[in-house]
Image (spheres, rainbow, N blue to C red):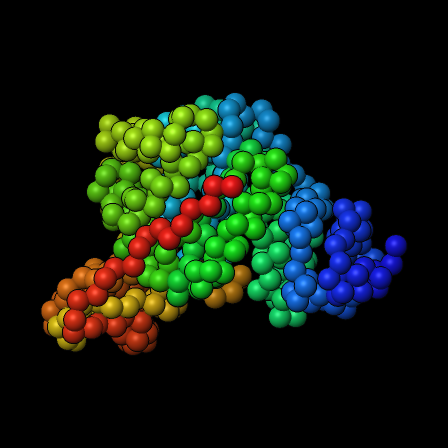
Amino acid sequence: MRMVDLIEKKRDGNELTKEEIQFIISGYTNGDIPDYQMSAFTMAIFFQGMSETERAELTMAMVHSGDTIDLSEIEGIKVDKHSTGGVGDTTTLVLGPLVAAVGVPVAKMSGRGLGHTGGTIDKLEAVPGFHVEIKNEEFIKLVNENKLAVIGQSGNLTPADKKLYSLRDVTATVNSIPLIASSIMSKKIAAGADAIVLDVKTGAGAFMKDLDDAKELAKAMVDIGNAVGRKTMAVISDMSQPLGYAIGNALEVKEAIDTLSGKGPKDLEDLCLELGSYMVFLAEKADSLEEARSMLEKAIQNGDALKTLKTFLEAQGGDASVVDSPEKLPQAKFKIELTAKEDGYVSEIVADSVGTAAMLLGAGRATKESQIDLAVGLMLNKKIGDQVKIGDSLVTIYSNNQDNVEQVKTKLYESIKVSPSPVQAPPLVYATIKE
């Protein structure tokens, strides 16, 4: 088998076999196939696409390029959730305890964030003492005991994907549905889940800004998951504005606590109930999505969800008293209000631009070496469709350094538009894909 022949085959729009795809991925991972040939191959995929079978084979070839996580010792059906990312995306902090509270095992492998705010691990580390440096045996034990644990990502999970993504990033082949779908699904499958719920974001703050593109990506990932024996469903949700109100690590932990108490932002609670219903249903803990949602609503109302959060935090060294006393979370020195300059209705909150403002405060990492300030961030006081009057607070800025507050304010004023006439809030969920 020669790589040049396989490049030519894909260039001409022909379907590759399982053996050919495995040859390419293993050869590239171990260094036998050079970057220049892989670049040509990914560009051929960019223009010619891949069949459903090819996408599934590509995904599994990347899964088997490195370590895979064996969760078979965990009792029950393990359901993972993946979000394609956004601003103020606190769903994992809510969903983990919420779904675990009704008996669904959540064995979560998470990473640190590079961007607007930290990843799930960074956010959880806003809780004093919390840590994810636990051995696999302890991880499995905690999930069996408490139905929930979070561990840091394995260093050798899907090395082919890491290498391939770096190449795509510098060869203008990132925006290819087959390559995006196989990249995401390879990591989820290698992490050991039996079933997968996907939250595919669309809008200004999302990777897939166009709704049709988001639907195409969601369908591609659902098809891959089901083709390789993982029950998979997708929800396409809005990220034209940030989800919830909080953007920042400790602020998002506080918002997760509020949501699990039934006092959180309606959009965050509704999306978590939607995603959680799919997780509970796929875990076969409920016979219908309606029954699953009812179980989750009850867990919030009777306090089980909040109790599960406390147990989870304590089991991993965290100070669970933050749940009842959120003031123990890191606190910013300064609170500055960004006030409205005109009367009207909020018509636009450009999510990724607001996220950049949070990163300027130190809530996220500009580079891998950047230090996150867990206390800082933004709290939205208005969302799209809300009425405002001159002087009303649009955003509360939480900062530990007043030197760049004016820059942050300028960025926020550029990001939030006010219209003189009423504006309809965008839908929270655009579509669901179940098969």
- In the depicted view, which residue is nearer to us: 169 or 152? 169
Q: In the shown orientation, is residue 423 left or right of residue 435?
A: left
Q: Image point 43% across, 55% down: which residue?
A: 201
Residue at the extreme right: 1
Question: In the image, is residue 307 above or below residue 336?
Answer: above
Pinpoint residue 101: horizontal percent, then vertical percent. 36, 29
Badge count: 0
Left or right of 380 on screen, residue 142: right
Residue 74 appears anywhere in the view = yes
| Position of the N terminus by quadrant | bottom right
Viewer-nearest residue: 195 or 421: 421
Measured from the top left, where is residue 22 in percent x and y?
A: 77, 48
Q: Can residue 162 be seen in this snapshot? A: no
Residue at image point 60% right, 62% down = 176
When the figure is inspected, residue 83 is found, relative to residue 195, above or below; the finding is below
The percent coordinates of residue 287 (x first, y second) are 40, 26
In front: 274, or 124? 274
Question: What residue is at 47 percent from the left and 60 percent from the top?
Answer: 212
Position of residue 12 measured from the top left corner of the image (x, y, whole percent):
76, 65
Vertical side of 182 occupied by 11: above or below: below
Residue at 43% over, 35% down: 279
Q: Is residue 367 left or right of residue 126?
A: right
Of 357 and 268, nearer the camera is: 268
